[in-house]
Image (cartoon, rainbow, N blue to C red):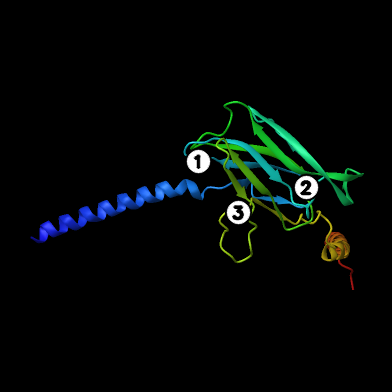
Amino acid sequence: MSRFRRTATAAAALAFTAAATAVLGFAGPASAHVTVNPKEATQGGYARVAFRVPNESDSASTVKLEVVLPENAPVGSVSTMPVPGWTVATEKRKVDPPIEVHGSQLTEAVSKITWTASADAGVKPSQFQEFPVSLGPLPQVDSMVFKVLQTYSDGNVSRWIDEPAPGAEEPEHPAPVLTLAAAAAPAGSATPTAAVASPGDDDDDDDGNGLAVGLGVAGLVAGLAGLALGGLAFARTRREPAAKS
């Protein structure tokens, strides 16, 4: 009887696990969202990022992607990489103050990038597509939030526009976020106080050591000379006859 109960319990556990797996597997794709990769870059530099777009629909394809660049962090140079089967268009807006790029003052910046799929080139169910972009110089801000609209062939639109809040859970439709780190300080910018003081000290030590070595050598030579003269005098004394009294 106990063996039967153990078998029934194990079977129930397996059935529960299978059901949970099925539910989670079905819900999994719905949690996917548009992201920017890599997620980090450096302020003042250039970065190649890609907007990664998974298709969440079971029957429709993604046929258009609209990426809105943040107004509080304009970028002077925006270049897109060709994506086979997709056309791309950009929109610009006025910026004040102007953006400096390689010594030039730019009064306009790209505000929106739109990719549109040609016939049968959309992102199919269970697939994803990346849309690469080069950006720079990156602004002096902590992060850039890109609001994205993902349009499907059946007319549905996923709006990835919710901005994250510090310390809060991820929103339901999070916008892609590029975190910007401060640029490292240039090499040699720190004041080398210890390094400046040490060469003088080393020179003094070298001079003192050289003087001591020189005096030691001179003393050794003088000692050897005295020993030689003493030996000659002793030998001469032995050769001369003793004086008679």
Say whether residue 241 is left or right of residue 10. Answer: right
Quarter occupied by residue 156? top right
Q: CA distance from mark 2 to mark 1?
A: 37 Å
Q: Residues within 10 Å of mark 1 (few under 14, many from 20)?
A: some
Q: Residues within 10 Å of mark 2 (few under 14, many from 20)?
A: some
Q: Secondary structure at mark 3?
A: loop
Q: Which mark is residue 174?
A: 3
Task: Answer with mark 2 or mark 3, whichever residue precedes in sequence.
Answer: 2
Say whether residue 165 is left or right of residue 230. Answer: left
Residue linked to disc 2 = 45
Residue at x 29%, y 54% (from the top left corner): 16
Say whether residue 41 is left or right of residue 44. Answer: left
Q: Secondary structure at mark 2?
A: loop
Q: Position of residue 160 (x, y in %)?
A: 62, 50
Q: Position of residue 167 (x, y in %)?
A: 60, 66
Which residue lies most toward the bottom here?
245
Q: Is residue 77 visible?
A: no
Q: Amino acid at mark 1?
A: Ser
Which residue lies most toward the left here?
1
Quarter occupied by residue 204? bottom right
Label 3 vs label 1, nearer the camera: 1
Q: Which mark is residue 57?
A: 1
Say whether residue 157 is left or right of residue 240. Answer: left
Residue at x 64%, y 39% (from the top left corner): 65
Q: CA distance from mark 2 to mark 3?
A: 25 Å
Task: Answer with mark 3 or mark 1, whichever residue precedes in sequence.
Answer: 1
* Of residues 191 and 108, the one drawn nearer to the viewer in this rendering: 108
